[in-house]
Amino acid sequence: MKPFPEILTTNFRLRCFTDKDLDVVFYALSHPDVIRYYGISYATKEETKLQMDWFRRIWLEQSGCWWAIEDSSGKVIGGLGFNNWTHVHNKAEMGYWLLPQAWGQGILRECIPALLNFALNECKIHRLEATVESENERSHKVLNFHGFKHEGRLQDAEKKNGKYITIDYYALINPRF
């Protein structure tokens, strides 16, 4: 098994989540502004530990790779990665989250290209998918900026907090593989 890939960008370090990140991951994935459009949320730190284990396990199982986004001061401000990596079809699903105080600062514009380079060139993924709640305008902009194509919308596709939500599907095709 290859060691977990650490990636440096101009201003950020993408690294493996560690047990020391539990508090920030719990804060983020229980914060109402973060989970408004995010698919998971946690009410306790015990639940969050399962997420932390999952971050590590998917790399070991070769089913994905999720990084903590660390700023120049060493503080974790978000996470991004891909999962549901299906080797037989050469595809995976990308996701990301940032702490609210990190929004609007161009962090994903800098970090997503590093993820894309790793997923598309190192892992040779052909199709990288992303699902977005239809009301999440910020994520629509992020995906469009990075070359993802909108492939469709599923009306009332999932139930969240007792209400049906509409999901948009995006994909980025890697013509090299």
Image (cartoon, grey):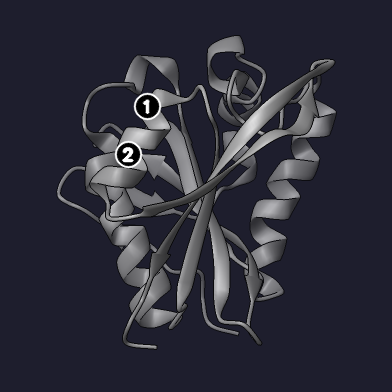
Q: Residue at position x 54%, y 20% from top?
A: 34
How many dots with numbers? Answer: 2
Mark 1 surroundings within 10 Å by alpha-carbon count, few (fewer than 14), some (14 through 19), many (20 or more): few
Q: Tell me if I can see residue 134 in this picture.
A: yes
Which three-letter amino acid code belongs to the residue tagged 2? Answer: Val
Q: Work out whether 91 lies above or below 175.
A: above
Q: Are marks 2 and 1 in contact (CB under 8 Å)?
A: yes
Q: Position of residue 48 (x, y in %)?
A: 75, 33
Q: Position of residue 54 (x, y in %)?
A: 73, 53
Q: Position of residue 72 (x, y in %)?
A: 24, 36
* Side of 12 relative to 26 (left or right): left
Mark 2 surroundings within 10 Å by alpha-carbon count, few (fewer than 14), some (14 through 19), many (20 or more): some
Which three-letter amino acid code belongs to the residue tagged 1? Answer: Arg
Tell me the residue that label 1 is attached to.
Answer: 138
Furthest residue in direction top, as rendered: 32
Q: Residue at position x 72%, y 63% from top?
A: 57
Residue 94 numbered mark, or none = none
Residue placed most toward the observer, 111 or 124: 124
Tell me the residue that label 2 is attached to.
Answer: 142
* Side of 151 relative to 69 (left or right): right
